[in-house]
Image: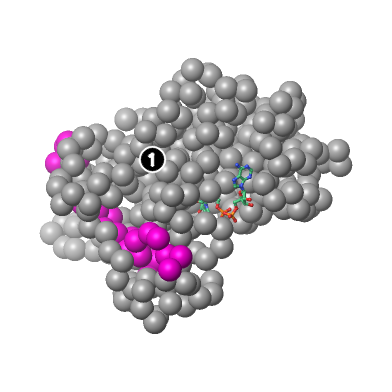
Amino acid sequence: MSIAIVTESTSETMREVHVGIIGCGGIANGKHLPSLHKLPNVKIVAFCDLIKERAQKAKEEYGTEDALVCTDYHTLLQQGDIEVVHVLTPNCAHAELSIAALKAGKHVMCEKPMASSYAEAKAMVEAAKESGKFLTIGYQTRSQVTHQYVRHMIERGDLGEIYYIKAPALRRRGVPLWGVFLDKEKQGGGPMIDIGTHSIDAALALIHNYDVESVSGSVYRKLADTAMNSNEWGIWKPEEFQVEDSAMGWVKFKNGATMVVETAWAINFDGEANMTLCGTKGGAEFRGDIVHLNGEKDGSLYTCDIKPNSTARDLFHGENLKCEEYEAKQWIYSIVHQIPPITKPEEACVVSHIIEAIYESAKTGKTIYF
Ligand SMILES: NC(=O)c1ccc[n+]([C@@H]2O[C@H](COP(=O)([O-])OP(=O)(O)OC[C@H]3O[C@@H](n4cnc5c(N)ncnc54)[C@H](O)[C@@H]3O)[C@@H](O)[C@H]2O)c1
């Protein structure tokens, strides 16, 4: 496996790219709009949301003066100058909107998870292939400096053969209470599909292994009904809590490696939920902006902490970009220069397959073979 490392001068100018936004809620305002707005060659020329006021507000803050505001995504897709569409709606609409945008000849950035089911994710991969346009998924963890640093270490063979990965996404109390996150039909599940999707994607991208042999999982609803029903985002109502509150998965790869996935929005756990990778030559653990390494040299064990800087990234060295800013900049760069985006649809599709298999295994009590 080899991933080209491209360096680029920050002074390079890129041609203008027109972007349309579908879904102007939390992630649009918290991640995409501020990051796109900082790119001098990007013009955000259309805003669509079922709630018109949200589209209007986003336009006023981030849009061009004559930007379109609408509530029907078909109207946005008809606008010929839009080259790129960001799909930022609840999970249930990802496939429909992304496929429609690809068919309309747009490049698509869709938020994570790729879709609420594996079948929908596969349909998105097919649509991207047929359209010849780029489709990427908003897994911004891959844009972290630490993630790219460790990926390069693994590519060089510094950690040897990676055979065990712990991929946690555990919140002691962190149930998202805005939007429709507790709605099974609209989201497809709870913490496993919401935040487990990030840790699974991040792990697979690090080891660059998409050859899964089998998956088993457990799904719990242990705290959703209890009196401990509050967190930093407010108070949840048990009767609206239609999804799991924690879920665990056990993934075996064809090469014999094992990955444990732990996810929770609410669990009685008070530790550090850090991703860990164990290889034959060394191990790496993510601790915030630090990579904690452990190995053996000349018969003695050692540990060391490394705080990587922007030169660890594939692109934009010397720029102090937040991961969502790097993701947006790399995305637009990939369109202008016709190089693949960081996250390929085929990879995100495997993440959706694993998540569905964890849910299926929990329901049937069986191991799911791929
Ligand atoms: N990358 C991350 O770390 C991250 C974090 C949070 C959310 N997300 C993802 O972003 C997506 C949206 O989450 P959110 O927190 O922004 O939710 P939200 O409810 O705050 O915003 C979603 C918006 O989409 C609009 N919408 C729904 N269906 C639509 C349609 N058919 N056409 C136009 N607009 C439509 C809603 O009216 C709403 O304003 C989810 O898939 C979620 O998983 C990703």
Q: Which residue is painted at 31% across and 39% down in the image?
A: 353
Identify whether 339 is placed above or below 94: above
Q: Nearer the viewer, residue 319 or 186?
A: 186
Q: Nearer the viewer, residue 330 or 115?
A: 115
* Residue 212 shows up from this direction: yes
Q: Quick check: 280 left or right of 147?
A: left
| Residue 32 place in picture, x, y as percent | 63, 48
- Mark 1 residue type: Ser
In the rendered view of the protein, which quadrant contains the C terminus? top left
| Residue 271 place in picture, x, y as percent | 33, 73
From the image, tell me which residue sits under label 1.
Answer: 117
| Residue 194 place in picture, x, y as percent | 43, 54
Tell me, yes or no, whether the highlighted magenta stretch contains residue 263.
yes
| Residue 26 place in picture, x, y as percent | 61, 56
Q: Quick check: 289 left or right of 257?
A: right
Q: Residue furthest front?
A: 239
Q: Which residue is painted at 29% across and 71% down in the image?
A: 222
Instruction: Check disc 1 and report its element: helix, strand or loop.
Output: loop
Q: Residues within 10 Å of mark 1 (few under 14, many from 20)?
A: many
Q: Nearer the viewer, residue 326 or 118?
A: 118
Tell me, yes or no, whether the highlighted magenta stretch contains residue 75.
no
Q: Which residue is painted at 79% across and 38% down in the image?
A: 68
- Which range of residues does the magenta coloring cover? 239-266
